[in-house]
Image (cartoon, rainbow, N blue to C red):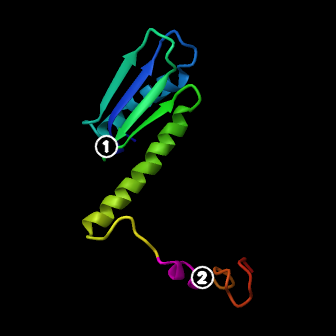
Amino acid sequence: MLKFLSKVKIEFNALDPRVASCMEFLAQCNARKAKESNPACQVLVKRRTDDFPPQITVTFVNGVEEAFDATSTPAQAIRTMILEKGQLLETEQMFREAGEKWPVIIPEEELRQFAPGTKPGVCVSPNSSSGRSCIE
């Protein structure tokens, strides 16, 4: 998860009963496997003394920053979002390294082209001769 991030900032009041997501996310960030995936990622913890709601702010390696209200967002949901966006970053980087434009624009007519199935009897195109998109 940390391999896609350059910085993680976790802010919470330790006496606030809503800190569960922050504590779980901090534990995930401090896991050996996570740290080994990107030792350069900064993990900052700001312990607050006011009523500010628990918050997790992540900065992706491309500089994009995203903040989460940790009172209403579970740590697992934040982790899943980071992994999904990270896969998009990897895909973008792969295309750029190959000299391709990003984002890749697929012409509308190519999206509607018939694609043969890998198994007999599978209708993969809504425009197939039978007019069905089903498995027979």
The percent coordinates of residue 64 (x first, y second) are 36, 43
Q: Is residue 68 above or below residue 18?
A: below
* Amino acid at dot 2: Gly
The percent coordinates of residue 87 (x first, y second) are 41, 54
Q: Which residue is mark 2?
A: 117
The percent coordinates of residue 103 (x first, y second) are 39, 65
Task: Specify whether residue 127 is in view.
Answer: yes
Q: Is residue 74 above or below residue 103?
A: above
Q: Residue 96 sits in which quadrant?
A: bottom left
For the point 35% across and 60% down, the residue is: 92
Residue 8 part of the magenta segment: no
Q: Which residue is mark 1?
A: 63
| Image quadrant containing the N terminus | top left
Q: Is residue 4 above or below residue 96?
A: above
Q: What kind of element bears circle 1?
A: loop
* Amino acid at dot 1: Gly
Q: What segment carries the magenta color?
A: 107-115
Foreground pick, 104 / 39? 104
Q: Earlier in the sequence, mark 2 or mark 1?
A: 1
Between disc 2 and disc 1, the foreground one is 1
Residue 111 part of the magenta segment: yes
